[in-house]
Amino acid sequence: MTVALVLAGGLKPELSPGELKAEALIQIGENYMVEYVVEALAALDEIKQIVISGPREIEKLYTTSTIKVVPRGTTLVKSFTKAYQKVPLDTRQILVVTGDLPLLSPQAVRHFLHTCHYLNGDLFYPLIKREDCEAKYPGMERTYIRFREGVFTGGNLLLIKSAVVEQCLPLVEDFIYLRKKPWAMVVRLNRKLLWALLLKRLSLQDVEKEAARLLGGVRGVAVCSPFPEIGFDVDKASDLALVKKLLSARKN
């Protein structure tokens, strides 16, 4: 069984001038931002339950037994922990999703889950090629990093086998805080990797091996996704304006 944890408790004052509003409650069209994320996840048979860590105002939006809301923590990691405590014991794997992905689609999540199913690993992290991002969303601003295999940006999903969650918590914390800074993530794994990166010799396999070393043998796998929407998180006013434009066009 797969359970999705949605981390939607972050505050982004730059997106709601004059008031301190949780990112989950930012209005985009007729819905709150978090509703787009939950809608995409709820459309998948592969996901049996969704646990949202966010502001209490979200509770009134969901009354079904398959969607639970827990209070947000003071940090993203504490929010993850609160949500994880509600995960059923028979859960096979956890899909961690940030709540600021209003363009997320069921197809993107399904592709990620199905791809991971056929890979040998314990922890899976998506990467999107630069050319795919720029082709679908020309105005999308992201930080990219060059590997031997190509130029990528990171997605805002993380799939973890339940058996290794406790062991992976330190790296999960770094993923959450450094997901927008791929250079910093490489340095966190091993400073020696930075030289390979600067010399354009760093491979995805190098990163996977170093992650396994740090996690005591837990196998981390980079997964290439053709869906840029999993990397389009709303951080700035320009992101929000572009998302509103795209969703309005999709509706019409």
Image (spheres, rainbow, N blue to C red):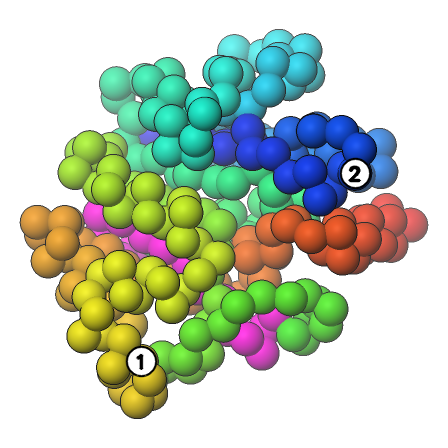
Q: Quick one: 84 or 39, which is closer to the camera?
A: 84
Query: What distance separates the C-alpha of mark 1 from that of mark 2?
Result: 38 Å
Circle number at residue 17: 2
Q: N-terminal of the two: label 1 or label 2?
A: 2
In which quadrant is the N terminus drawn? top left
- The residue most toward the front is 18
Specify the segment rendered in magenta: 118-133
User: What amino acid type is highlighted by mark number 2?
Assistant: Pro
Q: Secondary structure at mark 2?
A: loop
| Residue 13 picture location, percent across and down | 69, 38
- The residue most toward the right is 252
Based on the picture, tell me whether residue 217 belongs to the magenta stretch. Answer: no
Residue 27 visible:
no
Q: Residue at x 81, y 53 (%)?
A: 241
Q: Would residue 64 appear left or right of 79 to someone viewing this image?
A: right
Find disc 1 in the rendering and name its residue.
197
In the image, residue 56 sits, relative to residue 26, either above or below, namely above
Identify the image quadrant of residue 172. top left
Mark nearer the viewer, 1 or 2: 2
Q: Would residue 18 appear left or right of 48 to someone viewing this image?
A: right
Q: Residues within 10 Å of mark 1 (few under 14, many from 20)?
A: some
Q: Would residue 13 appear left or right of 158 to someone viewing this image?
A: right
Identify the image quadrant of residue 82. top left
Residue 182 visible:
yes
Q: Residues within 10 Å of mark 2 (few under 14, many from 20)?
A: few
Q: Residue at x 61, y 70 (%)?
A: 133
Counting labels gives 2
User: What amino acid type is highlighted by mark number 1?
Assistant: Leu
Based on the picture, tell me whether residue 122 belongs to the magenta stretch. Answer: yes
In the image, residue 244 sits, relative to residue 207, either above or below, namely above
